[in-house]
Amino acid sequence: MEKSMEKKKKEDILRIGLVGTGTIGRAHIERVNMKLQGGRVTACADPAGEFGVEVARQFGIRGYANPADMINDPDIDAVMCAAADERHEEYVLASIKAGKFVFCEKPLAPKADACKRIVDAEVAAGRKLARVGFMRRYDSGYLQLKAAIDSGKYGLPLLLHCAHRNPSVPDTWDNSMAVENSLVHEIDVLRWLLGEDYASAEVRCGKSSRRGPSGLRDPQVLILVTKLGVRIDVESYVNNHNDYDIKCEVVCEDAVLNMPKPSRISVNAGAFAGQGMYTDCYQRFGDAYDDEIRAWISASKEGFADGPDAWDGYACQVAAAAASRARETQTVVEIAYGETPALYRGERAERKGATS
Amino acid sequence: MEKSMEKKKKEDILRIGLVGTGTIGRAHIERVNMKLQGGRVTACADPAGEFGVEVARQFGIRGYANPADMINDPDIDAVMCAAADERHEEYVLASIKAGKFVFCEKPLAPKADACKRIVDAEVAAGRKLARVGFMRRYDSGYLQLKAAIDSGKYGLPLLLHCAHRNPSVPDTWDNSMAVENSLVHEIDVLRWLLGEDYASAEVRCGKSSRRGPSGLRDPQVLILVTKLGVRIDVESYVNNHNDYDIKCEVVCEDAVLNMPKPSRISVNAGAFAGQGMYTDCYQRFGDAYDDEIRAWISASKEGFADGPDAWDGYACQVAAAAASRARETQTVVEIAYGETPALYRGERAERKGATS
Amino acid sequence: MEKSMEKKKKEDILRIGLVGTGTIGRAHIERVNMKLQGGRVTACADPAGEFGVEVARQFGIRGYANPADMINDPDIDAVMCAAADERHEEYVLASIKAGKFVFCEKPLAPKADACKRIVDAEVAAGRKLARVGFMRRYDSGYLQLKAAIDSGKYGLPLLLHCAHRNPSVPDTWDNSMAVENSLVHEIDVLRWLLGEDYASAEVRCGKSSRRGPSGLRDPQVLILVTKLGVRIDVESYVNNHNDYDIKCEVVCEDAVLNMPKPSRISVNAGAFAGQGMYTDCYQRFGDAYDDEIRAWISASKEGFADGPDAWDGYACQVAAAAASRARETQTVVEIAYGETPALYRGERAERKGATS
Amino acid sequence: MEKSMEKKKKEDILRIGLVGTGTIGRAHIERVNMKLQGGRVTACADPAGEFGVEVARQFGIRGYANPADMINDPDIDAVMCAAADERHEEYVLASIKAGKFVFCEKPLAPKADACKRIVDAEVAAGRKLARVGFMRRYDSGYLQLKAAIDSGKYGLPLLLHCAHRNPSVPDTWDNSMAVENSLVHEIDVLRWLLGEDYASAEVRCGKSSRRGPSGLRDPQVLILVTKLGVRIDVESYVNNHNDYDIKCEVVCEDAVLNMPKPSRISVNAGAFAGQGMYTDCYQRFGDAYDDEIRAWISASKEGFADGPDAWDGYACQVAAAAASRARETQTVVEIAYGETPALYRGERAERKGATS
């Protein structure tokens, strides 16, 4: 009987090959092998050949000089892609070609047309294999907001007031990155939250803080309008020299809903009473990062793909591209996705996120 | 000695003539004669002649069939105007002509040109006699926000996110009134809060609630940009079937400041913990209404005019008119005030509000 | 007609003689003569003879070398007593003898037997003339708690958890003063809040802070049990080097009710989000101080005595004395008041506080 | 290479035998086998023989009619005990005899002398093998409180005000159970939080709610004083017909610290603004349950025992027994533990909890 136990266990473990062994990639190896259940990163590789092999040595797992060889190795059940954004398309397409589930860090690809090629590959393959790392769909706050909206108890959502605040960014940060880097998370999670697509994007600037790199327009305000007319404003303030804070206020017909503050003890001292706030996204979304990988591993073993799919990854980059154009031109830019392929239709929106 | 006491008291009391004996006017009589110190409504009148005399009889004060006679009576030291908006100009001009301090309910006049005629009359008279009832400048929450901004401790304000929410409005309410009626308070108080003028106005609509009169665009979003580039969004949602709630979030370079919730006991019951909210502006701004009149009476006795002046009343209607045009045309409309007359210059902004 | 107005006004003003021209006394003169409506401190006196006359000169009111002469002056309608606690009995009895309403700062008298003599004097006179300055009964937070309890909506109160926190006290402060000075306010307001008398008192100490005068037992915990068995714990921490904070948590059968925090703006800065707290009782209870005097003036003019009466003042000192004994002996001490005279019966508890 | 991987994996998995297949036991099987990393419940048994075998069949793991056989099976690396409290001693002693790490649900044993026998067995064996399921030491709120206290930033703790509130209890619940069942968690976690032992216990009752079984004294207040004089009051209210709420307020010399509310979205509707509360301990402490088992599995594999040890389990029951006596006699009862055996000394208190 112990035998069958062992056999069972072997099948139990999803053998993952990870490509891209930078900071985020190594964090994934630790998360999967030290913390989470049911999967194991048994091999890794990096576009920079030997570097991936060296990281593998450190973790006592197999290293490959060439990521493609790892992706195609029959001893690898599934792939995680944490390489530079520009390489995502290559490794995701290779995984689809190999018929393997692949978890890709966001964005699916920087450009919408690259995302579209991934969508086309899945359509051709007739299977949904790629998943995108939009971890916010797994955050307890957003899940509670979604449950409250979907309950219908509070009427329809009419307006959203959101903010994405961050203590500081590197000097390499430029005016395009507020939209193309940080707001991409809002673009995906709010589409998921409302369960509908966007019709237009607009980007305006507030008065700029003197705290950031000179010449940086910060804060910026992204205004999205959905097909059904819900108006969303998202403040991006990436040099607030304060905290990492994500605000999401949903004005419904009969109620106003708000994300909770971080769950920190209250301190009343020095004639001031309050609580500490988080200072980075790993503190704020730590549990969500774990839960998305946990969900992906379980789903992959069951043979279906859970979480944001290639179409979501594509839709997000289409909206992001429109927002970037809106920022450059300071006009309102329409957002058009083209028709959703049958492969991606008829799935309830929340099915694509955490099922909590 | 008691004599001199009596004499002193007589001088002490500011003898006020009130014009416009409707609900708000009668509330002012009660406030001044029952609650506040140092003034007394000793007479009242109403455009509807006999009605004012009847109200006077009820309060045991003198009644005048003709408001002008009351305004010109030497036994009247100052005037309060609570008549219909359209009549404000007439009574305020009469008071200025009579050389008397006059407190006028907001708006100073519905149209900017009427406000301008009042400004011109004061300039001609060389005295500032009119004050406008923008009570929010006396609200503790706004005063704390202003003190925090003016302290410089938190850097410059960059963005403001505001909301003006209300349970319901009469069926006579139309799409223009969000801006022209309820948001006028924000237009004044935010200009005072930031201590600078507006450069442009824009009005957009969210998805409309099904709870209001059919055809009503509600909520609406007013976007104001100041001369120095501070971007302000104000949500007006007047049929929320919930509470009367005023939100003001000030995003500064180094901090985010927010108005406090109403000071209500917390109730933890039925597995829900929270507090009751207000349902009308008289609950929310009750103290502010008292404080503005108290400040006006004291200042009038000292011989200067405290609080929002005629130029503030004019500036507010200029911005409101621009916002209305912006709503009708769905474009961004520039706001131009013309040059500020010397009479209204060189006064620090906060001097024009509560000094607390 | 103006004549009758003048006449009316004369009658309108309650002419108050104030005895005890120290800090609190002078604050009362300013409050009544500068801020509140319907009364006027027209004279003052001080046990230290000439000092009172000097203060009168500063305020331009009449001064008396001998407080008794002022109290008996027919031009004085009512008396305010802000003299040292030990002198309260003398001036309150004199006022009762003169048949005048008298507002006495808390305590009515330091010792219960002195309070009892005042009660006896009122019973002999057959009139309730004395009122005690327990301003907390006029605080919005306590009023909301009382309204919630009296509504019956939340079931019966079972337990109260309270705290009385203070930044620091003078070095003259000793171990008896937590109970005899600061907790006297809780002893009165909680009896009023629950509408019932106490059965026993107990005082225990926590570990003492090293921040106070050496040898001081601080914090101390006062435990009161009511006749119906409600158990109350009150923390007194008078050297918290932090803020002035009053906590009152009412555990009812079906809900937990809590006093609101001060109504201050929230500040999110330095990765900490919260609000400023008050640092003294005049900030915390500023409105309550005004409201209690306002209520007393109005009631006095109507010819009845509003607010905490002599029996309340007596009952408070009886409980305070028991608490002091409990502290000295570290035992549980019973509290017995003797029978309530008919004069003080049959009045609903809340009638004795603010009627809001 | 894949071979060695498999080999490694086999060693990696801690093979757990679970005794006591009731609700909690089965929840542990699911938690370990479905959710957590590094361990696997490979067998189970129940005092009720066949029942354990049936549960094993459902989970596809090995079942034993006799728990002892399972505990002694060389294919079992460690033991989890979720049997009825009275059986804990038997299975924990058996595990120690077998030289296996054993995780025992709280209490280690209902009676202190039984706990002492377990302590003696470990001392005889010269190893610490037993761990007790006091999951609160792994709760983020308590961990933050402990970190804040241990930082020394806020001075020494002086007073603790705690509450343990619960919607309802079965009719079988009697007056002894508040202390012996629900407050046992506070007795352990507060001793851990302060890092010191108790000197005395006292139990008093508030007015009883009419909502519970008739005759039940509810709420009850447990008062603990530590060796260094910190005074702790803990309200136990187990029929509040409201929510499951754990309060812990730590009054330090320079600050007041409080546990956070549950992290739920805020809802502003119906003129009331607040958040949902939890209604049972599995919602409130769900993460803590996971984290304690996760920590125990990891530590067991590293060969040491993490978390509350047998001495903690013993110390808790000693205090609980004193509290029960205090409740029965309504007196203050001293708490004496006897000398701590060397085996349990020289470990920093926090070492015994989560290391976060």
Image (spheres, coloured by chain):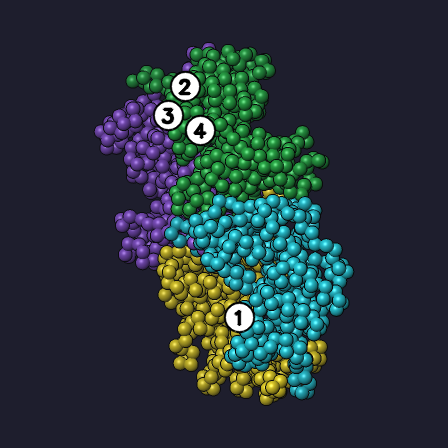
Chain colours: A green, B cyan, C yellow, D purple
Q: Which residue is drawn at 43% across and 44% down?
A: A156
**Residue C33 or A145: which is nearer the viewer?**
A145
- Number of callouts: 4
- Would you say residue D217 is visible in this rendering? yes
Q: Where is residue C81 in the image (x, y as percent from the top left)?
A: 58, 77
Name the residue beneath numbered marker 1: B22
Q: Which residue is drawn at 29% across and 18% down?
A: A1
For discs 3 and 1, the disc positioned in front in the rendered view: 1
**Residue A107 or D313: which is nearer the viewer?**
A107
For discs 2 and 1, the disc positioned in front in the rendered view: 1
Circle nearer the N terminus (4, 2): 2
- Would you say residue C89 is visible in this rendering? no
> Which subunit holds the residue at mark 4?
A
Q: Residue C197 appears in which quarter of the rendering?
A: bottom left
For discs 3 and 2, the disc positioned in front in the rendered view: 2
Name the residue beneath numbered marker 4: A307
Residue kind at label 4, given as amino acid type? Gly
Q: Looking at the picture, do discs 1 and 4 lie on one chain?
A: no
3D distance between C-alphas at marks 3 and 2: 37 Å
**Residue C276 or A316: which is nearer the viewer?**
A316
